[in-house]
Amino acid sequence: MKRLWAKYRQSRDEDHEEMCTNNALVVAAVTKAEASFGSRRRGSQPGRALNEERFRESRGKNMMEDYFVERPVFSEEVFRTRYRMSHNVFNRISSNLCRYDQYFVQKSDAAKKVGLLPQQKLTCSLRMLAYGAGADQCAEYCRMAKSTSFEALKRFTRGIVNLYSAEYLLAPTSADLRRLLAKAERRGFPGMIGSIDCMHWQWKNCPTGWAGEYNGRKRVPTMILEAVASYDTWIWHAFFGMPGSCNDLNLLAKSPLFDELTAGRAPQIQFQVNNRIHNLGYYLADGIYPQWATFVKSIPRPTRPKDLKFSEAQEGEQEGCGKMFRHFTVAL
């Protein structure tokens, strides 16, 4: 019995030793892989290829002459078309990002060589976002390496979210609601908070394994944006990222739009229509939405003059907000 127990302990110790050896080999291999991966961006080392001369300083000067000097080559209209914003908005974003993240500030390296301009990094990021351009396409005009383009894009999106989401994706305050309700009443919609709709955004680079989940009525992989907008094309609610196989009802079930209402913290809104007082605001919506008090939908096949007038007014409101949704989707 003692002999068997000794053999068992010896076998267990050998297994434990073998397991420890295997673990040590795995850790060593991972450490070596991480070290070799990290060394690719660790400065000059023997055996590395020389950096490509991209003439980024001269190309940055040309970019400034194209758009950002007192008398640029291209007009304000061309700038707005290509950058999807005005000069003033671009300059404000550039100044805020440079204060938020020193990565966008132009600096010199150890060899006293001047780095990229903020305009070059922002231009690359905006063109990748607005036009779906690849990093290689932006390198031709902005003269940035592929890794630098991706780094600029990540820092740009992170900075925009942290700087502006608290203001531009904020639910309407009491003062905002009073202004929205007053304007809506003058336009013939008392009690209306805004228009709600969903847009499908095509996911060009959707992984093949996910295509079935994201394929919907568009027959291509899409993601859905649910948004609420007011008459001044201000977005008060945005819920983005649901698979394109869902519809407006599936999206509504997961959306946080009515979380405050169901929790009993919704703002008190009171308006009068046809000598009847209502205590709940509503959104203009299309026919797929449910028969809830918070939705006012179009009248199917209107025949009476009153119904025709209401349908025409609602279609105008929905169309205006629909254009805004499309612009917002392009910006994404």
Image (spheres, rainbow, N blue to C red):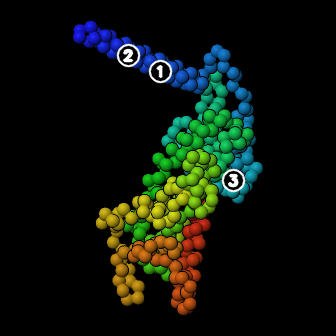
Say which of marks 2 and 3 sits in front. Answer: 2
Residue at 44%, 73% in the rendered image:
290
Question: Where 235 sits versus 142, above or below?
Answer: below
Nearest the eye: 196 or 96: 196
Instruction: Establish if 156 lies above or below 35.
Output: below
Near-viewer residue (50 or 245):
245
Of the numbered discs 3 and 1, the one sitting upstream in the chain is: 1
Tell me how far mark 3 sits from mark 1, CA to CA.
51 Å
Relative horizontal placement of residue 85, taking residue 298 as reference (left or right): right
Question: Which of the 4 image quadrants contains residue 279?
Answer: bottom left
The type of residue carrying mark 3 is Arg
Which sits earlier in the primary sequence, circle 2 or circle 3? 2
Which disc, if any, is residue 15? 2
Residue 293 at least partly seen = yes
Camera-side residue: 276 or 233?
276
Q: Which mark is residue 26?
A: 1
Which quarter of the image is occupied by the N terminus?
top left
Residue lying at the far top of the rendered structure: 3
- In the image, farthest residue toward the front: 1
Does the residue at mark 3 contact the one at mark 1 (Cβ under 8 Å)?
Answer: no
Identify the residue at image location x=36%, y=80%.
Answer: 278
